[in-house]
Image (cartoon, rainbow, N blue to C red):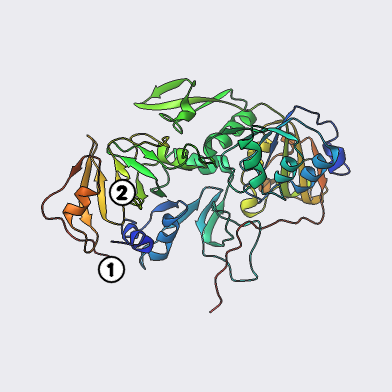
């Protein structure tokens, strides 16, 4: 079973040289730490920056230079800055190659819920609805099961939706799964030490799995 | 050149009245019009509808206007950092309309470009779509969303000239240029106000035609919400 860093490490292997990538808050942010050497990517921050660099050195924080998580950051050679409308313009027109974001639930037809829990304070969707509705390539980083062992990969989302029929790949602490265009999860890889049976048990949505599924390579 | 300079924030916001709709630039606490927010608190104008990506924190940004109960309604994409906001929302004192961030920005842009509506895929199939027209273009569904109609837009820029031309700095640009375009009356506060000719016309982010009043603020606090650093090796 993977921890958060393990999920991030596995997702990083999906990033190809030359990609423009938007990383959401939480596990997706960790993906930046595992991008392999020699793979050139440009990170987009939807508050208006392409080419997000690392955190500044202590004492060099600039209040005018933050990312979408409101953290102080830096730019890199070749960075560019723009307004919020253009930022979502490049998202909507699919100039961003890959979007990685978290989710509370995903359904077998690719619906995603990640912004609202009824009865709890609603903070808002931020840019999540724009991203999921527009991105051509979305990877969801999420927990497969909650603390009670209940599946978060469902036949149908129970929480209010962020987007419909838009997710094609999910990486969890247990597995890598594709969501098939005709519906259903397809097990692609299992986490080290996790059995296909356990993944079957932990997936309440329709799951297609071969008897023998390869283990993830995290190196 | 037309001179748009006003003395200070108090003069800039002098005719904002109870019940009006105002846009406020900024993302989190980055690039917010600190001086005009302070002047609005001082003036005590009430029942405001505020269109802004976020709602500030308890003791800074729009949070200051919430504390004094001057806001009737917030129109935002994310409001997570403010306990007083949460209290007023749960008690029913405050209305909130949550809008996808790109839709928020593009509804501002549409107002500034003179277009009544936009079509966006954001929110299709979700509760955001309730009651809205859906149209299918090239096999994909889009929601029709209206351009904003705001009485005032209040923005913060790095530099400006007395003709109203604006230059922004780093990611404090964010919503400021699109909101500057969208107000019936646009107020800009800047860190440095210069004479016409001192800014290179090729480097202007917001042309002065969109800006009606401009003044130089001083002693900007520029509070950092999440101070993240890396160690020096």
Chain under numbered label 2: A
In percent of width and height, residue A187 lies at: 20, 49
**B35 to B226, vertically: above or below:** above
Tell me how far mark 2 sits from mark 1, CA to CA. 19 Å
Q: Return the x and y of residue B16 as percentages of the image width and height.
A: 81, 31
User: At which x and y percent is residue B14?
Assistant: 86, 34
Pointer 2: residues within 10 angstroms few (<14), some, or many (20+)? many
Q: How crowded is mark 1: few (under 14 residues within 10 Å), some or many (20 or more)?
A: few
Work out whether mark 2 precedes mark 1 in sequence or the reverse, and give the earlier one: 2
* Position of the N terminus of chain B by quadrant: top right
Where does label 2 land, which residue? A170
Q: Could you tell me which residue is drawn at 55 percent across and 34 percent down? A: B99
Q: Is residue B1 visible?
A: no
Residue at image position (23%, 61%) is A216
Q: Quick check: A62 above or below B133?
A: below
Along the line of sight, which residue is nearer the eye, A95 or B199?
A: A95
Residue B132 vs residue A4, the one in the foreground = A4
Mark 1 highlights which residue? Answer: A219
The residue at the far left in this view is A211
Circle 1: element type: loop
Q: In which quarter of the image is residue B177?
A: top right
Q: Residue furthest bottom?
A: B233
Task: Name the residue located 59 percent from the left edge and 43 percent from the top edge.
Answer: B79
Give the secondary structure at mark 2: strand
């Amino acid at each position: 079973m993977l921890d958060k860093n393990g999920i991030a490490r596995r997702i990083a292997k999906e990033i190809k040289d030359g990609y423009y990538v938007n990383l959401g808050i939480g596990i997706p942010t960790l993906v930046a730490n595992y991008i392999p050497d020699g793979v050139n990517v440009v990170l987009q921050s939807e508050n208006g920056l392409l080419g997000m660099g690392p955190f500044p050195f202590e004492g060099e924080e600039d209040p005018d230079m933050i990312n979408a998580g409101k953290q102080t950051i830096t730019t890199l050679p070749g960075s560019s800055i723009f307004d919020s409308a253009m930022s979502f313009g490049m998202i909507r027109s699919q100039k961003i190659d890959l979007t990685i974001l978290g989710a509370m639930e995903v359904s077998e037809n690719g619906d995603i819920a990640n912004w609202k829990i009824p009865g709890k304070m609603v903070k808002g969707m931020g840019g999540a609805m724009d991203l999921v509705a527009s991105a051509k390539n979305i990877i969801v980083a999420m927990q497969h099961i909650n603390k009670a062992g209940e599946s978060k990969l469902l036949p149908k989302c129970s929480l209010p939706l962020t987007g419909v029929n838009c997710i094609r790949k999910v990486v969890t602490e247990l597995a890598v799964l594709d969501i098939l265009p005709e519906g259903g999860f397809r097990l692609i890889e299992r986490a080290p030490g996790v059995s296909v049976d356990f993944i079957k048990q932990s997936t309440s949505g329709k799951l297609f799995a071969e008897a023998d599924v390869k283990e993830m390579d995290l190196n | 050149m037309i001179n748009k300079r006003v003395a200070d924030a108090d003069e800039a916001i002098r005719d904002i009245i109870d019940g009006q709709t105002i846009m406020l630039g900024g993302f989190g606490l980055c690039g917010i019009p600190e001086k005009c927010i302070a002047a609005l608190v001082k003036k005590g104008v009430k029942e405001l509808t505020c269109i802004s990506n976020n709602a500030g924190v308890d003791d800074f940004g729009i949070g200051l206007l919430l504390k004094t109960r001057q806001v009737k309604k917030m129109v935002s994409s994310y409001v997570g950092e403010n306990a007083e906001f949460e209290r007023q929302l749960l008690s029913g004192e405050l209305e909130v309309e949550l809008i996808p961030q790109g839709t928020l920005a593009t509804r501002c842009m549409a107002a500034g470009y003179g277009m009544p509506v936009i079509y966006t895929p954001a929110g299709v199939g979700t509760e955001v779509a309730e009651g809205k027209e859906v149209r299918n273009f090239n096999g994909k569904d889009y929601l029709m969303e209206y351009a904003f109609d705001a009485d005032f837009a209040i923005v913060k820029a790095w530099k400006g000239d007395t003709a109203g031309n604006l230059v922004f700095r780093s990611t404090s640009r964010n919503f400021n240029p699109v909101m500057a375009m969208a107000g019936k009356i646009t107020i800009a506060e800047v860190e440095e106000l210069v004479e016409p000719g001192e800014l290179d016309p090729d480097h202007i982010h917001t042309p002065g035609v969109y800006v009606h009043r401009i003044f130089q603020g001083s002693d900007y606090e520029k509070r950092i919400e999440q101070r993240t650093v890396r160690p020096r090796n």
